[in-house]
Amino acid sequence: MTETSAAASSSTSTDLVLERRVVTEIPGPRSQELHARRVKVVPPGVHSVLPVYIESAHDAIVRDVDGNQFIDLGAGIGVTTVGHTQAEVVEAAKAQLDKYLHTLFTITPYEPYVRVAELMAEHTPGDFEKRTVLVNSGAEAVENAVKIARKFTGRRAIAVLDHGYHGRTNLTMAMNFKAAPYGTGYGPFAGDVFHAPSSYPYRDGLSGAEAAERTFWYLEKHVGASDLAALVVEPVQGEGGFMVPADGYLPALKEWTEKNGVVFVSDEIQSGMARTGKYFASEHFGIVPDLITFAKGIAAGLPLAGVTGRADIMDSSHPGGLGGTFGGNPVAAAAAVAVFEMIEKDALLAEATRIEKRLKGGLEDLQSRFDIIGDIRGHGAMVAIELVESGTAQTTKVPNSAAVSALAAHAAKNGVLVLTAGTNGNVLRFLPSLAITDAQLDDALGVLADGFASL
Ligand SMILES: *Cc1c(COP(=O)(O)O)cnc(C)c1O
């Protein structure tokens, strides 16, 4: 039954020539065969954006079972931030595999978990004592941040911002702004979650102070500050479309939460771990969150997530209240330690800044030629373009999701993997690994330019 995949899996990540290559139609015949098997055993609810089946990957290149090679501008949604199959990470995981795979930290603990907690304490903003709990997924991290904030404050309500995204569990579905596809038909949802207006400079035209006033008014009138346990904020929004809030917005929110005894949670699951040119995007805005949730980029592809925060808040949970069977798995934790070491050794924060310059430069050039690019925004290797109907970029800004779909399809056909985003589905987002070269970026931008020209 697995003959086809065995026959196709001849090369490993180290054999890869790191360039874009299209050698069959996309998806190719072997991918189509695998897809036919998959649809008989995997439900359509687990949707794949581009059903090319992957054989190997290295740095910013993924190779499919037909031998097509894609420049990966998505990094598995910002997970392989340090690059696919980096030797340091693979070696660290292999070394751990030879020692033990699981003991359960809440039964008999081990060092890699403690080391990750030390590194998180060191690299998250804030000079106070911190604690870290490790879990398996981003949604689980958000769930834990909410639990911890409620326990600490003794309050019921949770506030999130418009256009936010926090996961697919029952609680986090209630915290998402966009209903479809994440929540449609899956209710009833958890209660006491309130969605406050955010800052979206391209569309609301508000200063940071004005947008913050609007957020406070909503929270004070509609929720009541004294009932609010936590405000959960993505400093740069992910699924919502990479919105960077107006200057002063996040500091104002932070100050308001301090004044009102509300726990400020920065959801850095997408924006954290060197992605934006800082360890955590909160640093771009000069804010020091009470709690930070992290996941995606921390272990270069192995499942690891968690919450880091102020010791007094984290310590309010009683023994046994936090944890889970697989949380802080030793192999994933060993990989995470290697990721932190790579960020330092390879000066990856500077790589994110290099990528931002190259990418934004190329996109600005495209914007001067194609007036449907309404906005270019983001920090580091987390950059997006918002597309609108021709002639509306400065006026009505009519969302153009058709162009986004056509461009993503054009890119895929030509060996460039690019992700979409946005509440209106009209955003192309770029989350390349920090190992991507300027030549690969330029090549991918050239494919996009052809795509724009052919719209
Ligand atoms: C991806 C994401 C989540 C959910 O993480 P999962 O690991 O998919 O559960 C939560 N918050 C943000 C900001 C994310 O980008």
Image (spheres, rainbow, N blue to C red):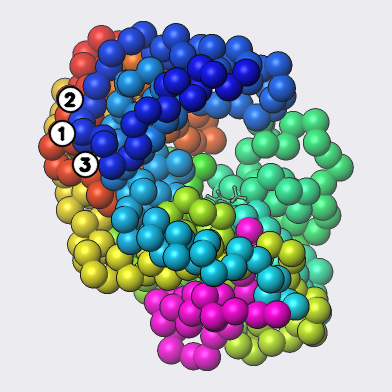
State the residue at coordinates (66%, 84%): 313
Question: Which residue is more in the foreground, 56 or 235?
Answer: 56
Please tell me whether mark 1 sits on a helix, a strand or a loop.
helix
Q: Is residue 39 left or right of residue 11?
A: right
Task: Find residue 80 and report its horizontal and vertical position in percent.
Answer: 40, 49
Q: Earlier along the polypeptide chain: callout 3 or callout 2?
A: 3
Name which residue type carries label 1: Asp
Asked if residue 425 lies in the magenta stretch, the reply is no
- The C terminus is located in which quarter? top left
Q: Which residues are magenta?
A: 108-136
State the residue at coordinates (50%, 22%): 5
Front of the two marks 3 and 1: 1
Task: Find residue 213 and report its horizontal and vertical position in percent.
Answer: 54, 63
Please tell me whether mark 2 sits on a helix, a strand or a loop.
helix
Query: Disc 3 designates what residue?
Result: 359
Determine contact: label 1, label 2, CB under 8 Å: yes
Q: Is residue 390 left or right of residue 420?
A: left
Name which residue type carries label 2: Gly
Q: Which numbered circle lies on residue 446?
A: 2
Q: Is residue 332 visible?
A: yes
Q: Is residue 291 visible?
A: no
Cα separation between marks 1 and 2: 6 Å
Question: Which residue is more in the foreground, 318 or 244?
Answer: 318
Q: Quadrant of residue 338?
A: bottom left
Q: Earlier along the polypeptide chain: callout 3 or callout 1?
A: 3
Cα separation between marks 3 and 1: 8 Å
State the residue at coordinates (36%, 52%): 81
Q: Is residue 122 left or right of residue 269?
A: left
Cα separation between marks 3 and 2: 11 Å
